[in-house]
Image (cartoon, grey):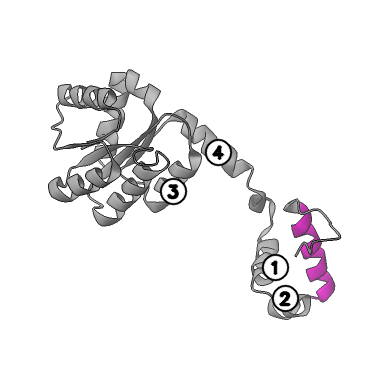
Amino acid sequence: MIAEDSVLLRIGLVKVVEMAGFEVAAEAGEAQGLLAAVAAHRPDVAVVDVRMPPDFTDEGVRAALAIRREWPGTAVLLLSQYVEERYAADLLAANTGGVGYLLKQRVADVEEFIEALRRVAAGGTALDPQVVAQLLVRRASDPLERLTGREREVLALMAEGRSNAGIAAQLVVSESAVAKHINSILAKLDLPKADADHRR
């Protein structure tokens, strides 16, 4: 299954995958057509553009997530013009097997593209090196990663709306220990002091 709104790129993808021995069950130029075709044909793998009509935002990736939910036997290889790590993270969070995310420039290297397509169709994963780099940068910059295990426990209890006394009773520590943890959490999360706002 090939889902790409650019007619020239779609025709090119069809030719490339057919020359590699794949049978193209259907083609689509928009997300609804993709979902209907997957329901009708149950392909082994769908190659899907991230941005498709009508809004050219995230229709393709939303369709890909729906495919993985509804028809988990259909692998999905997303193609994108740019690295959009949110979409890659969404797809990988749902399922790490039978998924891929490549930049469209990788399609120019036909052997590399076909190898990635075969890997995804077989239940593996294919991620563009630039996508991996972006995901790692995003993870490294996650301020929650800076918190210790105890600070995460305190933060979770804060999020439940508990007072310092309530947190201290739950964790069997002193209120002063809780206050120190909270100060550390607020500093690590880069929440500046402000007269108009309550950091907690």
* Pointer 4 residue: 136
* Horizontal side of residue 87 vs 100, given as left or right: right
Location of the C terminus by quadrant is bottom right
Q: Nearer the viewer, residue 85 or 136?
A: 85
Which numbered disc, 2 or 4, marks the residue that appears first in the sequence? 4
Q: Quadrant of residue 175?
A: bottom right
What separation in Å lies between label 4 and label 3 (alpha carbons)? 15 Å
CA gap, disc 1 and disc 2? 7 Å
How many angstroms separate mark 1 from mark 4 (CA)?
A: 26 Å
Q: In the image, what residue occupies the spot 48% across and 29% down? A: 130
Residue ID for mark 3: 90
Checking the image for residue 154, the label placed there is 1
As measured in the structure, the alpha-carbon distance from the residue carrying label 2 to the one carrying label 4 is 33 Å
What mark, if any, has residue 26 been given in the picture? Answer: none
Q: Which of disc 4 and disc 1 is earlier in sequence?
A: 4
Crowd class of label 2 (few under 14; some 14 to 19; many from 20; radius 10 Å): many
Bounds of the magenta segment? 174-187
Q: Amino acid at mark 4?
A: Leu
